Image: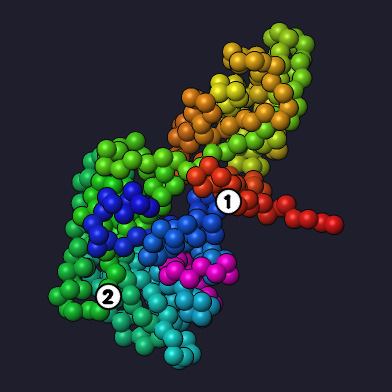
Amino acid sequence: MKAFRDAVPDSMKLMASVKANAYGHGAVQTARVAEACGADYLGVAFLDEALELRRSGIGTPILVLGYVPAEGLELARRHDVTLALFREDILEAAAQLPAVGKRLKVHIKVDTGMGRLGKRAGGEAERFLERALKVPQLDVEGLFTHFAKADEADKTYTQLQFDRFDGIARYVRSNDLPIPLIHSANTAAGIDTPEWGGGMLRLGIGMYGLYPSAEVNRSRIDLQPVLSLKTEVVMVKTVPPGWGISYGTRYVAASEERIGTLPVGYADGFSRMLTGSAEALIRGRRVPVRGTICMDQCMVGLDAADLPGNPVQPGEEAVLIGTQGTERITAEEVAAKLGTINYEVTCMIASRVPRVYLRGGAVVEVSNPLGRETD
Ligand SMILES: Cc1ncc(COP(=O)(O)O)c(C=O)c1O
């Protein structure tokens, strides 16, 4: 947050995107840190995500970036949740809300070329905006769009989207429409083209210390990943030549081999599609995952690397994403093996994986939804 605060104009507000459990990092904990770092807004995808934050005592303004059905409008108004508005029937439903003192805050979503949500730029959006401004139950606080290719080196399409959005922004200014927050930038635009971002940067992946792609200009901002995925070796055994490992015995030991078992599998977000390519770090070295990744466990070959002081013992740390000694496995490396992006790798980490929060190297919180006392 601080790195981005320094990199973008002072006048630009910062929204911390904590949707999808804060990209796997833990929504409530991340939102609290973002609040402490001066986030002006929080962004989520669903009303339920916003309500979870409110239940946890988060008071910062929250914008739901995605669709909220008509039956959610009153709930949103009651809990001071701002909604994205882009559908005629939802506008009509808002106009039918019982008149109470409080208005429902909305940001009108404009489609400038993402083709996902929003009223199309170039007439449709302006007309919708004018109608929304006439609904007394609504407080039209914002107007926003989303870039489809801001993370690519070629900015031609982003320029086109910016120009379309700027047309509406000029319409707002020339008609003196009272809309204080006009915004378009995601992390990639915040890094490469903050001048096209309007009044607020909607910061997602960058806040987790990850770059949105290999093509953004890394020299503009220095990011370090905040997340590691760690486990420990829970069993070590030596198998004879010909011994099969895991479902389908896709791996068979060619010679006597030491095998370690890790209590993490595809149900934790360590995808089965990593079978055959995944590695873990043990004693600062890379070791291969052996055989099929199971639902809750996977095996590693402990003889393949020259592990200092081998034999490895149960209880030793294994790193699946992160740093150990001088070795590092990045979310990008895992993503490349899966044919996806770093975003998906951290989002995949399942809710049953305990989150351990550190500050300055010291544990400040452990969140383990399954770890309740039963006696
Ligand atoms: C509408 C919207 N704004 C902002 C973001 C944040 O994007 P990023 O994580 O690339 O910064 C997202 C995330 O997908 C989004 O959907």
Give SS at disc 2.
Answer: loop
Task: Name the amino acid, label 1.
Answer: Val
Measuring 22% from the left and 79% from the top, which residue is drawn there? 177
Task: Name the amino acid, label 2.
Answer: Ile
Residue 172, image x, y percentages: 21, 73
| 161 relative to 292, above or below | below
Residue 179: which disc?
Answer: 2
| 57 relative to 97, above or below | above
Mark 2–mark 1 distance (CA, rounded to whole Å): 40 Å
Is residue 339 visible in the rendered image? The answer is: no
Residue 58: which disc?
Answer: none
What is the magenta range?
55-73
Measuring 61% from the left and 16% from the top, which residue is drawn there? 307
Q: Is-magenta flag for residue 119?
A: no
Measuring 67% from the left and 51% from the top, which residue is drawn there? 368
Q: Are marks 2 and 1 in contact (CB under 8 Å)?
A: no
Residue 282, image x, y percentages: 60, 25
What crowding class fits label 1: few (fewer than 14 Cα within 10 Å), some (14-19), or many (20 or more)?
few
Residue 364: which disc?
Answer: 1
Mark 2: C-beta under 8 Å from nearest atom of ligand 1: no
Give SS at disc 1.
Answer: strand
Q: Is-magenta flag for residue 65?
A: yes
Between 159 and 368, the residue placed more toward the observer is: 368
Measuring 36% from the left and 71% from the top, which residue is drawn there? 107
| 64 relative to 222, above or below | below
